[in-house]
Amino acid sequence: MRRMERAGVVPVTWLVASSEWRRDWAHEETANQLGPILFEHGGATGVALAWELQLPATPTTDGAGA
């Protein structure tokens, strides 16, 4: 690892790499495969994703989102 760093490599975690590979969440077939992994192993990222996914389903005072 240290030799790679000296050569200019910037080490990243599996979470960073998977996020870069994912690129966007519009491709539902692969997003549906990564989501459960993030929920189970992603720590705060999994919690943040769960929060973001529940927002569209949250009712509002004007009835939108229900």
Image (cartoon, rainbow, N blue to C red):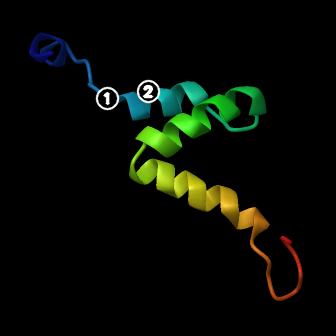
In the rendered image, residue 56, in percent from the top left (x then y), is placed at 76, 64
Q: How many marks?
A: 2
Residue shown at 77% from the left, 66% from the top: 57
The residue lying furthest to the bottom in this view is: 61
- Residue 44 visible: yes
Query: Which type of secondary structure does the marked residue at label 2 adopt?
Result: helix
Does residue 57 lie above or below 62 as drawn?
A: above
Query: Which type of secondary structure does the marked residue at label 1 adopt?
Result: loop
Does residue 54 lie above or below 40 as drawn?
A: below
At label 2, the amino acid type is Ala
Work out whether residue 12 or residue 38 is closer to the camera in this orientation and state it: 38
According to the picture, the residue beneath numbered tag 2 turns out to be 17
Disc 1 versus disc 2: distance between alpha carbons?
A: 7 Å
Residue shown at 49% from the left, 28% from the top: 18
In the rendered image, residue 20, in percent from the top left (x then y), is placed at 51, 29
- Left or right of residue 6, residue 44 in this image: right
Mark with earlier residue (1, 2)? 1
Residue shown at 41% from the left, 53% from the top: 44
- Residue 27 visible: no
According to the picture, the residue beneath numbered tag 1 turns out to be 12
Residue shown at 82% from the left, 88% from the top: 61
- Please say if the residues under marks 1 and 2 sit with CB atoms less than 8 Å apart: yes
The picture quadrant where one finds residue 52 is: bottom right
Q: Quadrant of the C terminus?
A: bottom right
